[in-house]
Amino acid sequence: MEMDHDHGMGMGGMYPPSPMTMNGSNNTGTMQHHNMMMMHMTFFWSKNAEILFSGWPGTRSGMYALALIFVFVLAVLVEWLSHCKFIKPDANHVVAGLIQTFLHAIRVGLSLLVMLAVMSFNGGVFLVAVAGHTLGFLLFGSRVFSQSPPPAKASDLPPVRC
C-alpha cells in the first residue's frame, strides 16, 4: 500500500513511491525503512539544514556557518554585478553587448543560487541573504559611497544594470 506523503498539498511526485506492499514488506519479505529528509514548507531555525546540495552543510555548526557566509557573499556579488560599470562609453557595440550578456548570465545564475538557498526555508539563510543584498546595495548601489552626483532623473532604487 503506497502512502500519500504530500498531505494534500498538491506536491504529488515530490517523494519517490514506496516499494512497500499491502502487508508492509518489500518483495523479500523484510521490513524496509526509508531515511528521507523532510522538506520544510515553513521557516525553521536550525543548523541542521540542507542548503543547495544534498547533505550540505551537514550537522556540524562550523559547516552551517560556512554555508551562511557563502550565501551572504553570493548576495553581495549579485549587488556588485548589478551596479558595476565594466564597459567604457566608447567601446565597440558588439563587444559591449557580449560583455553585458555574459555579466547578465552570471548575475542571474548567482541570483538563482541565492533564491534556491532561501528555498531551504532556513531562517538563518533567509537573514544572511537579505543582509548580503542590503550590504551590497549600500556599498555599490546607494549614494553613501558615490563620488559623483546622481543623474538628474535618478530614483531611490536604481534599475538593475551592469
Image: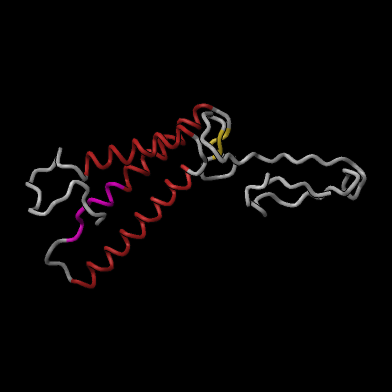
Placement of the C terminus among the 4 image quadrants: bottom left
- Work out which residue is located at the far bottom of the displayed protein and give it: 94
Q: Based on the picture, tell me whether residue 85 belongs to the magenta stretch.
A: yes
Q: Position of residue 45 (x, y in %)?
A: 51, 29
Q: Could you say which is closer to the camera, residue 75 or residue 1?
A: 1
Which of the colour schemes (rainbow, by chain, secondary structure, one colour) is used? secondary structure
Is 49 left, or right, of 34 in this rendering?
left
Residue range in magenta is 79-87
Question: Going 19% across and 71% down the picture, which residue do you hit?
Answer: 93
- In the rendered image, the vertical position of residue 94 relative to residue 143, given as above or below: below
Q: Position of residue 31 (x, y in %)?
A: 87, 40
- Work out which residue is located at the far front of the displayed protein and give it: 8
Question: Going 43% across and 37% down the picture, which residue do you hit?
Answer: 126
Is 21 left, or right, of 37 in this rendering?
right
- In the rendered image, the vertical position of residue 32 relative to residue 47, given as above or below: below
Q: Position of residue 132 (x, y in %)?
A: 34, 38
Question: Going 55% across and 35% down the picture, which residue do you hit?
Answer: 49
- In the rendered image, the vertical position of residue 162 relative to residue 49, given as above or below: below
Q: What number of labels is visible? A: 0
Q: Based on the picture, tell me whether residue 43 belongs to the magenta stretch.
A: no
Question: Going 72% across and 39% down the picture, which residue do you hit?
Answer: 35
Is 159 left, or right, of 41 in this rendering?
left
Is 15 left, or right, of 69 in this rendering?
right
